[in-house]
Amino acid sequence: MKRLVLASGNPGKLRELSRLLDDLGYELHAQSEFGVTDVAETGTTFVENAIIKARHAAAHTGLPALADDSGIEVDALDGAPGVYSARFSGAGADDDANNALLVEKLRAVPAAQRSARYRAVIVLLRHAADPSPLICEGSWEGMIQLEPTGDGGFGYDPYFFLPALDCSSAQLSADEKNRLSHRGQAMAELKRRLSAKGV
């Protein structure tokens, strides 16, 4: 198995990405296993933040690093929370606080105007100084609902409604979510590119 460090301590991300990489022979380890702490995400785009996180994890572990930066963009909020999705309600925010703020900001917005998308960027660095990281992207269209449904997934999933499936992303099985989601799309692209390179 080829070892990769995931530039995150998020157990939800580790589960999803491990499942997606397993058939390529990669063993994904959270950076927290190596005592690596989070780095400040000072970028203004998902690409910048993913590269910052991957370089930090690779530099501290000596391993190739995989980083994901993702978030939800709500059209009625001019694309917010975007890159600030994980800390939408402030530093040290959790999912409940972030979702509560999202609902509060959208409560007066008609349902038809609550269009949104999840966006993900995944970066793979061979080493900390890699000058040409692999960058893969995915997006997933939906709507924001004001009441949560489902108990799967994490983050904004219980509020991210998929009209074509008549359910929230938190109501999907792990396999369905991996096939459809923004992160699943980005990972599918990464897998295609890794397979093409024979990496």
Image (cartoon, rainbow, N blue to C red):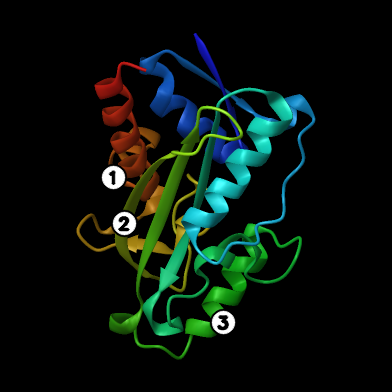
Characterize the local packing of mark 1: few (<14), some (14-19) or many (20 or more) Cα atoms within 10 angstroms.
Answer: some
Characterize the local packing of mark 3: few (<14), some (14-19) or many (20 or more) Cα atoms within 10 angstroms.
Answer: few
Task: Identify residue for label 3.
Answer: 104
**Where residue 79 sits in the image (x, y, percent)?**
43, 76
SS for dot 2? strand
Quick check: can you spot residue 10? no
Quick check: can you spot residue 18? yes
Of the residues shown, which amino acid type is indicated by label 3? Glu
Of the residues shown, which amino acid type is indicated by label 1? Leu
Q: Nearer the viewer, mark 3 or mark 2?
A: 2
Q: CA distance from mark 3 to mark 1?
A: 28 Å
In the image, 32: left or right of 182? right
**Looking at the image, do the residues carrying marks 3 and 1 touch, with CB atoms under 8 Å apart?**
no
Q: Quadrant of the C terminus?
A: top left
Asked if 167 appears above or below 29 in the picture, the reply is below
Task: Identify residue for label 2.
Answer: 140
**Where residue 120 sits in the image (x, y, percent)?**
42, 52
Whichever of callouts 3 and 1 sits on the residue coming sooner in the sequence is 3
**Looking at the image, do the residues carrying marks 3 and 2 touch, with CB atoms under 8 Å apart?**
no
Whichever of callouts 3 and 2 sits on the residue coming sooner in the sequence is 3
**Which residue in the rendered view is the most extreme toward the top?**
1
Residue at 40%, 84% in the rendered image = 76
Asked if 143 appears above or below 51 in the picture, the reply is below
Q: CA distance from mark 3 to mark 2?
A: 23 Å
Of the residues shown, which amino acid type is indicated by label 2? Trp
Marking on residue 180 = 1
Characterize the local packing of mark 2: few (<14), some (14-19) or many (20 or more) Cα atoms within 10 angstroms.
Answer: some
In the image, 103: left or right of 141? right
Tell me which corner region of the image, top left, top right, bottom left or bottom right, holds residue 108. Answer: bottom left
Looking at the image, which is closer to me, 12 or 166? 12
